[in-house]
Image (spheres, rainbow, N blue to C red):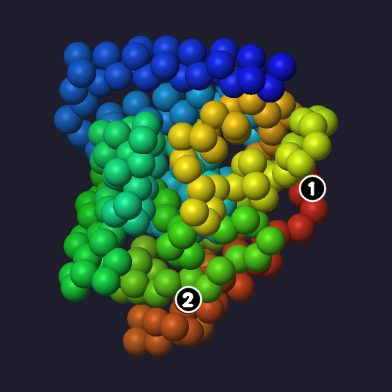
Amino acid sequence: MHVLRALLRTAKLIGYFTWFGLELLIRRPATRQARADWLHRFCAAALRGFDVKLTVEGEFPARGALISNHLSYLDIIVFAAMSPCVFCSKAEIKHWPILGWMTTMAGTVYVDRGRGGSAAKAGGEMKLAAEAGLPVVFFPEGTTSNGEQVLAFHSGLLAQAIGAEEPITGAYLSYSLDEENGEGVSVSDDVAYWGDVNMLKHIFRFLGLQGCHARVRIGDGPIAFRCGVKDRKGAAREAREAVLELAGTFVNTAT
């Protein structure tokens, strides 16, 4: 059943890419808003098609930056399904199969870590997104983990957002499997994507799962930083603490 389910959902995925890809080629959305709306509709359809349940507590910010912990390529689909937005992501993502094409066409801002001026360039793009009325989503950990801990936050993009005086809101994302998927299946290995794992094999394995539930808790308002842009490491620690405070039992949820 696992393999059959994965095959059927792979066929669905191909169908989604064909349909939305043709729309992209024909309409060629020229504005950030139009590209963000395309990504939003694409990802919302994908979550429904793969039977991934989404529970959200809190309001998606209308502008500024939304920061979150990072577990999987699925995170991008989850946040984009919630609201039109622009992503800031590590440059490696544009080479990922499927998602790389999708995020590039949707106007993702890529950050090439270790290359001088990359964060500043991304900061400029964040400002343009704000002027276009779109929130920017990024993952300060800079990479994915298995979800057992939240890694240290990098300070580059945070400093750019703080320096631009844009509000920064925290979010915490978690996954669970609500149904039995067989021996050896776990969220940390089969939903979270981390370490030296073949992406295509991981995606196929994920598509065979059942009962996947994504939960997102968003802060009540922007993070009140005590540290300013001059203390980048201090601000990064404060941002991580704000995200960690959002972890825990979900109440007053809406699906």
- Quick one: quadrant of the N terminus? top right
Secondary structure beneath disc 1? Answer: loop
Secondary structure beneath disc 2? Answer: helix
Residue toward you, 224 or 159: 159
Residue toward you, 191 or 80: 191
Residue count near mark 1 (Cα–Cα under 10 Å), binned few <14, some 14–19, many ≥20: few
Q: Is residue 164 visible?
A: no
Residue at x 46%, y 34% (from the top left corner): 200
Q: Is residue 155 above or below residue 98?
A: below
The x, y position of residue 97, in whole percent, is: 36, 35
Three-letter amino acid code of the residue under disc 1? Val
Q: Is residue 249 above or below residue 150?
A: above
The x, y position of residue 77, in whole percent, is: 48, 36
Residue occupied by mark 1: 251
Q: Earlier in the sequence, mark 2 or mark 1?
A: 2
Q: Are marks 2 and 1 in contact (CB under 8 Å)?
A: no
Q: Is residue 193 above or below residue 141?
A: above
Q: Is residue 227 left or right of residue 157?
A: right
The dot on residue 41 is none
Residue occupied by mark 2: 236
The x, y position of residue 191, in whole percent, is: 62, 42
- Quick one: quadrant of the C terminus? top right
Residue count near mark 2 (Cα–Cα under 10 Å), binned few <14, some 14–19, many ≥20: many
